[in-house]
Image (tube, rainbow, N blue to C red):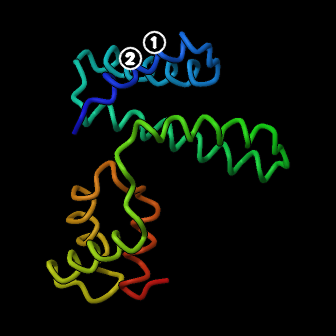
């Protein structure tokens, strides 16, 4: 996995030159979130850990969008959506629901799962394979559907 910090740093300079305030703001926020995590944990984050920080930031934006839409604040939702789009450009490609379902079926076969009771075992096998490529909530729902526990 490529380190997102490299492309963030390069794009920071480009956004400064282009005077793209929104992009500049989002890139700075992302770099600051990674730096804060390094300070908090007192380690230099690996590329995967840096990407995980960006995933958390993207998740925050998705939650903010949902809350803003429910509150009828479409202006805030569109602002968060624009930030999310910029953040997502630095994340690994997200798997489609079909790709996740295929991997989930393989994990179900691997652990011999047959009912919703086996969901924990399936998720334990599946989530490390999907790290950074799918949101846990979506994976959980797909596995639940496949195991017949809707």
Image position, residue 50 (x, y; %) = 32, 30
Q: Nearer the viewer, mark 1 or mark 2?
A: 1
Residue lying at 81% horizontally and 39% vertically, measured from the top left? 75
Q: Quadrant of residue 96?
A: bottom left
Q: Nearer the viewer, residue 144 or 12?
A: 12
Question: Helix or strand or loop: what does disc 2 sit on?
Answer: helix
Q: How many neighbours does mark 1 have within 10 angstroms: few (below 14), some (14-19), or many (20 or more)?
A: few
- Residue labelled with disc 2: 9
- Residue labelled with disc 1: 13
Q: Nearer the viewer, residue 42 or 92?
A: 92
Residue lying at 50% horizontally and 36% vertically, measured from the top left? 87
Q: Nearer the viewer, residue 137 or 5?
A: 5
Q: Is residue 36 above or below residue 109?
A: above
**Is 112 left or right of 10, judged from the image as shown?**
left
Q: Nearer the viewer, residue 48 or 96?
A: 96
Residue lying at 21% horizontally and 28% vertically, measured from the top left? 46
**Is 142 left or right of 24, judged from the image as shown?**
left
Q: Quadrant of residue 35?
A: top left
Q: Contact (CB < 8 A) between labels 1 and 2?
A: yes
């Amino acid at each position: 996995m490529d380190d997102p910090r490299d492309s963030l740093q390069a794009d920071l300079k480009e956004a400064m030159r282009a005077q793209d305030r929104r992009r500049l703001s989002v890139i700075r926020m992302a770099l600051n979130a990674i730096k804060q995590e390094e300070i908090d944990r007192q380690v230099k984050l690996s590329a995967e850990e840096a990407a995980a920080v960006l995933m958390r930031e993207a998740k925050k934006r998705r939650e903010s969008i949902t809350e803003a839409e429910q509150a009828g604040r479409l202006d805030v939702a569109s602002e968060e959506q624009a930030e999310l789009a910029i953040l997502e450009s630095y994340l690994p490609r997200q798997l489609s629901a079909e790709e996740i379902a295929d991997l989930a079926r393989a994990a179900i076969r691997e652990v011999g799962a047959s009912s919703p009771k086996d969901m924990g075992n399936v998720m334990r096998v599946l989530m490390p394979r999907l790290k950074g490529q799918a949101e846990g909530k979506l994976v959980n729902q797909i596995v639940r559907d496949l195991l017949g526990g809707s």
